[in-house]
Image: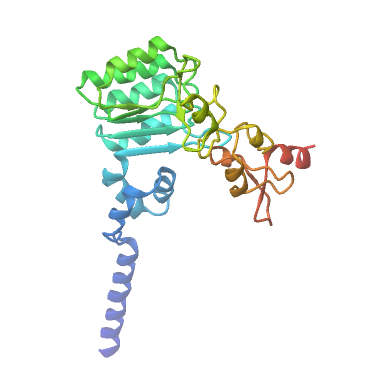
């Protein structure tokens, strides 16, 4: 009798243990506070960890209301289809869309997202080289049809934008909306215009102003101050220029001692067993010949 009772108790305990294994526990409530602050690719990776994380992300709209895609890799990863799938998680309530250096996003891909999320009030698409000025104008026009007021628009790096197209954008935007591109006072072309932050700038002293695009006035990619002849000897691994102060601070290639600016730091080639990096040019000469 005692043996039978003990056996029944053990079977009940075993069945309970199996039930606990088959029914995963829910994520801790604090997880939902963290999710909105995670970068996009970390969010997507978390969804692959386990079923409970996947369910938590699919059932919570908050992490998907502000999408930031920084596709700073040599081979762009995010296509129109991928972007639409990601933004669909906001269920039409996307508030901000930031696409940086997304080389696969087309006008049609952007317009599909905007059409399905008419409440976007922040649109940043810098250096998305396939996008056109016509596509940006259509996207802003679509948002205007839904009485959406854009707060910020960034289009630096969009190819071949004309003065007339920039004027059209300004006519579509409210006075409170900031846009990162304007007409350069020196070359009269639509570009990003900078003002030298140095109070001791020689150009300011001579002309009263040091304002212009980077094609008219050479500037440090990091601090945006104008660079003079003394800085031209600061060799850089990318095509941008650096002042001496920023050149000294940035990490250098282990072979040629040239740094990348932060905008092009993704081009660093990491070598196994080394804490440093080598630039693309040195990598090609050393490992692919």
Residue 260: horizontal and vertical position, in percent? 61, 41
Residue 80: horizontal and vertical position, in percent? 43, 27
Observer-nearest of 142 and 231: 231
Q: Quadrant of the C terminus?
A: top right
Residue 110: horizontal and vertical position, in percent? 38, 24
Q: Looking at the rendering, which quadrant does residue 30 occupy?
A: bottom left
Most extreme residue toward the bottom is 2
Most extreme residue toward the left is 147
Residue 221: horizontal and vertical position, in percent? 54, 35
* Horizontal side, residue 139 vs residue 246: left or right: left
Most extreme residue toward the right is 289
Residue at the location (42% across, 53% down)? 49
The structure's colour scheme is rainbow
Q: Looking at the rendering, which quadrant does residue 235 occupy?
A: top right
Relative to 67, residue 24 above or below: below
Most extreme residue toward the front is 206
Residue at the location (45% across, 19% down)? 184
* Horizontal side, residue 233 vs residue 264: left or right: right
Residue at the location (39% across, 9% down)? 164
Q: Looking at the rendering, which quadrant does residue 171 occupy?
A: top left
Residue at the location (45% across, 25% down)? 192
Observer-nearest of 58 and 179: 179
């Amino acid at each position: 009798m005692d043996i039978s009772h003990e056996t029944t108790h053990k079977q009940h305990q075993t069945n309970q243990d199996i039930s606990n294994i088959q029914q995963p526990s829910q994520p801790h409530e604090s997880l939902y506070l963290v999710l909105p602050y995670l970068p996009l690719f970390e969010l997507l990776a978390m969804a692959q960890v386990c079923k409970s994380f996947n369910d938590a992300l699919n059932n919570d709209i908050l992490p998907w209301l502000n999408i930031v895609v920084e596709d700073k890799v040599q081979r762009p990863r995010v296509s129109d289809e991928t972007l639409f799938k990601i933004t669909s998680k906001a269920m039409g309530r996307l508030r901000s869309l930031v696409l940086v250096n997304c080389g696969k996003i087309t006008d049609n891909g952007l317009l599909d997202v905007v059409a399905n999320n008419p409440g976007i009030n922040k649109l940043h698409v810098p250096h998305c080289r396939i996008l056109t000025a016509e596509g940006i104008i259509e996207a802003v026009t679509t948002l205007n049809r839904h009485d959406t007021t854009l707060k910020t628009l960034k289009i630096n790096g969009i190819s071949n934008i004309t003065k007339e197209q920039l004027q059209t954008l300004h006519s579509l935007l409210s006075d409170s909306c900031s846009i990162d591109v304007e007409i350069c006072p020196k070359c009269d072309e639509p570009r990003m215009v900078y003002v030298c932050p140095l109070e001791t700038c020689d150009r300011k002293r001579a002309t009263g102003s040091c304002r212009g695009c980077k094609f008219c006035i050479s500037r440090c990619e990091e601090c945006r101050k104008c660079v003079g002849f003394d800085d031209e000897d600061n060799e850089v691994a990318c095509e941008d220029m650096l002042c001496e102060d920023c050149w000294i601070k940035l990490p250098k290639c282990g072979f040629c001692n040239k740094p990348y600016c932060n905008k092009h730091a993704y081009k660093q080639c990491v070598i196994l067993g080394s804490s440093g990096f080598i630039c693309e040019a040195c990598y090609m000469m050393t490992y692919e010949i």
